[in-house]
Amino acid sequence: MTGRGARPPGASARATEDAAALTRRLGALEEGAIRARAAARTLAAWPPARAVEAVAVVSRGRDVRSRAAAAAVGQALAAPGPDLGYEALAAIYAAAADRGLLEVKSLLVSPAPRKAYREPRDRDARLAQLTLGHKKSLARTHRDPDLLARLAAEGEPAVVRELLANPLLTEAFAVRIASRRPCRPETLRALFEARRWRTRPAVAAAVVRNPYAETAVALKLLPFLGVQDLRDVARDGSIHGLVREVAARLASGKRGTAGG
């Protein structure tokens, strides 16, 4: 486990210590913008080589704290701001490329989804007669599983967000939403943005393996997956090649730290 004596294969002692310190620092902060800005400030303060080596160790962590830290780092790298600008990002990317750290490089790029979403021609006639506000209200409070399934199938992102907040929604239903094809990328992003669901390995795996998912979203969810799920992603020819390769590297790194 990162920061408790185990050292991932190929990681230096300093990188392991830096990753542990970063994980502790971020874990003490509230999830979201505050944690992401702290990650950005830390990475900006380190030389690029040191930053990428620490991020690589964090991304291979198996525990909840490492996953949370990896998510914060991903958010910091994906949304440049005053604490970590494009110049620093370019230097970090170059250092990652020089060291062959694809798991770090992937956090800095956002390739298009493997499949482009196209609006279906056949629409649910009954739902088409309802206003967006009415659909959101039904998604938030209704108990009828058939109606909820139809709302999920329509895939209106604003409605799906309300559906994901419905206390009656089960993990199996969330997986069903994440597995639907074709699926709006915004719907899959809504699952990623829902704290209740993105940490569920089954939901995260379903989003990652959906070819309509934004590559940036799939890459950020990979740290939430276990070794077997990562291996399955690495072998899935229907999803983006970058996602598959990063999954393979993460699986190899996590397997190497098992029992550490």
Image (spheres, rainbow, N blue to C red):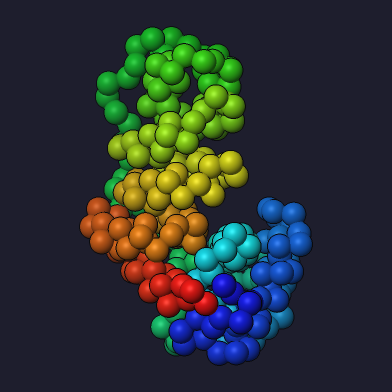
2 sits to left or right of 259: right
* Residue at image location 63% in from the left, 77% down from the top: 4
Residue 94 placement (x, y as % from top left): 49, 83
* Quadrant location of the N terminus in the rendered image: bottom right
Residue 234 placement (x, y as % from top left): 30, 63
Say if residue 252 shows up in the picture.
yes
Say if residue 253 shows up in the picture.
no
Q: Is residue 244 above or below residue 102?
A: above
Residue 21 placement (x, y as % from top left): 70, 76
* Residue at image location 45% in from the left, 57% down from the top: 225
258 sits to left or right of 235: right
Name the residue furthest front.
Answer: 259
245 sits to left or right of 32: left
Res 2 → quadrant: bottom right
Name the residue furthest left.
Answer: 237
Q: How many marks?
A: 0
Residue 53 placement (x, y as % from top left): 55, 82
* Residue at image location 52% in from the left, 77% down from the top: 260
Residue in the foreground of this view, choosing between 173 and 208: 173
Res 168 → quadrant: top right
* Residue at image location 59% in from the left, 27% down from the top: 167
Q: Is residue 163 above or below residue 55?
A: above
Q: Is residue 26 above or below residue 201?
A: below
Residue in the foreground of this view, choosing between 181 and 174: 174
